Amino acid sequence: MKLEGLSFVGFSRAKPAGKTVSAINPATGAALEPGYFWATADDVERAVQLAANAFQEYGRWPAKRRAAFLRRIAELIEANATAIQERANQETALPLARLQGETARTCGQLRLFASLIEEGWWLDARIDRGDPNRKPLPKPDLRSMLVPLGPVAVFSSSNFPLAFSVAGGDTASALAAGCPVIVKPHQGHLGTSEMVATLIQQAAREANAPEGVFSMLYGAGREVGIALVKHPLIKAVGFTGSRAGGRALMDAAAARPEPIPVYAEMGSINPVFILPGALQQDAEAIANGLHASVTLGVGQFCTNPGLVFVERSADADAFLQKLQSLISSTPPGTMLTADLCASYRSGLEKFARIPGVRCSTAGNGDPGAGKASAALFVTDVKTFLATPDLMEEVFGPSTLVVQCESRADMLKAAEKLEGQLTATVHGTPQDLDASSGLLAVLTTKAGRLVCNGFPTGVEVCHAMTHGGPYPATSDGRSTSVGTRAIERFARPVCYQNFPDAALPDELKESNPLGIWRLVDGKLTNKS
């Protein structure tokens, strides 16, 4: 597949303008060909206009047609998987095995949403039949369902060049809902993004989709990203990245004459609470699992456990000693970009300067340019509670262990935490029974609670929640993983006293699609 370095504007490629920017191989520092031209203001305007026009048709496509489109994208990605993974490896230094798994997840997401929209239950179709004889006033016939919002802007993440990128969960869920998508790819994987965008464009042509159902615009966040968010025809935004980036998009969207929702995932330290009974049973196994979770992918997961709470005890000392040994023997790993690595090192230096915090170990050997060493910090609960900086995310293979004097200390710490994607508790049944207050607090702090496991690894399924209270995400009522993600790009519409022939098929009395509906308060898939 030949790479051109040009944005996708509907079925066309943007014209070259200005200077080019190259993707960088983080393992070698070498620039990768070709150079990429940033999109212009005219490209942004044309892409959005095409998307708005496409929505008039695509938003009315039957579910089976949209599902076939999603499945074709998955087929094309699989057919070109080897080339895509090789380029992604060059741009991110992620191992091929990880990228193969990410390819499978990307295609699995597309197919999951295809099946979801064919089944139709996600539309939340509700029917309350009218009663003209009701006294003192007749009861109207009311029927409601979810409908697509309109064109959506999607921002790719740095740490998942496939599954949270051009054809990732935001794009899949928005297209499934009936919304055209304009992607701003991450600068860390420009070529990978172009390859995937080429295949989406091919699938759109094969499906006879309206031009503008998909576009992809290269560019910096301020020039292209903010321009997309501010455009009056964009109706929602999906974003995965930093808190600063997410806040900038949220503020721009809120300042519009017509504010729009920004669904931003902005980071998390994913606290882990290890209760005494669990440590007594198997401190070594917990240390092994925690180390694997902290260092997985050089710590570049949004669910990386960056904070651990334990009560002081001999078992806790054994746990900490084992964790120190594991961290110290971890070889340095190449991070996704030089900027991420520099930010990680800066975060480590900041923690190391805080009084009352000791850096127990910092990996082994000379990390070299672009490489990060694993790090373990230890402090006491008093220092933690008095130092807000210790609650900041350090994106990379490090974690902070907070030694508590009692379970009451753990509860105080939990109450102090910001919103999180996940919170984990290790405990025996007796531990959990004695910690109902802690569990209740964590329910208010995180979108996913993990028991006797570790938060890295986010299953794509109907029940998953990958979100959480601010600042983990901009809207804790939503998720970016799992089938509930489609709800971000839809809104309810109610039809009152419409004749049956004028209703959408999903709400007609005969239920021609055979979907599950709430009819007069009872779930049924019958007419």
Image: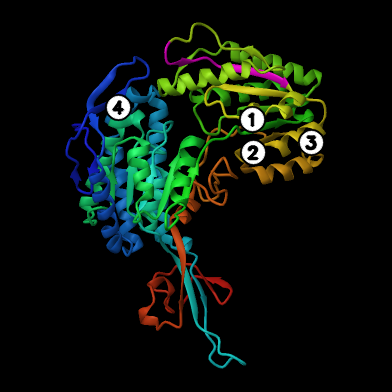
| Residues at marks 4 and 3, CA–CA distance in whole angstroms | 48 Å
Judged from the image, the secondary structure of the residue bearing numbered disc 3 is helix
Above or below: residue 33 compared with residue 198: above
Q: Nearer the viewer, mark 4 or mark 2?
A: 2
Q: Position of residue 349 (x, y in %)?
A: 57, 16
Which residue lies under the disc numbered 2? 418
| Residues at marks 3 and 2, CA–CA distance in whole angstroms | 24 Å
Mark 1 or mark 3: which comes first in sequence? 1
Whether tag 4 and tag 2 are in contact, CB under 8 A, the answer is: no
| Residues at marks 1 and 3, CA–CA distance in whole angstroms | 25 Å
Whether tag 1 and tag 4 are in contact, CB under 8 A, the answer is: no
Judged from the image, the secondary structure of the residue bearing numbered disc 4 is helix
Q: Residue type at mark 1?
A: Met
Q: Residue type at mark 4?
A: Arg
Q: Residue type at mark 2?
A: Glu
Q: Is residue 396 left or right of residue 147?
A: right
Whether tag 2 and tag 1 are in contact, CB under 8 A, the answer is: yes
| Residues at marks 4 and 2, CA–CA distance in whole angstroms | 37 Å
Q: Nearer the viewer, mark 4 or mark 3?
A: 4
Q: Which quadrant holds the N terminus? A: top left
Q: Position of residue 102 (x, y in %)?
A: 41, 34
For image coordinates 27% across by 58% down, the residue present is: 54
Residue 25, quarter of picture: top left
Mark 2 or mark 1: which comes first in sequence? 1
| Residues at marks 2 and 1, CA–CA distance in whole angstroms | 8 Å
Numbered label attached to residue 431: 3
Residue range in magenta is: 369-379
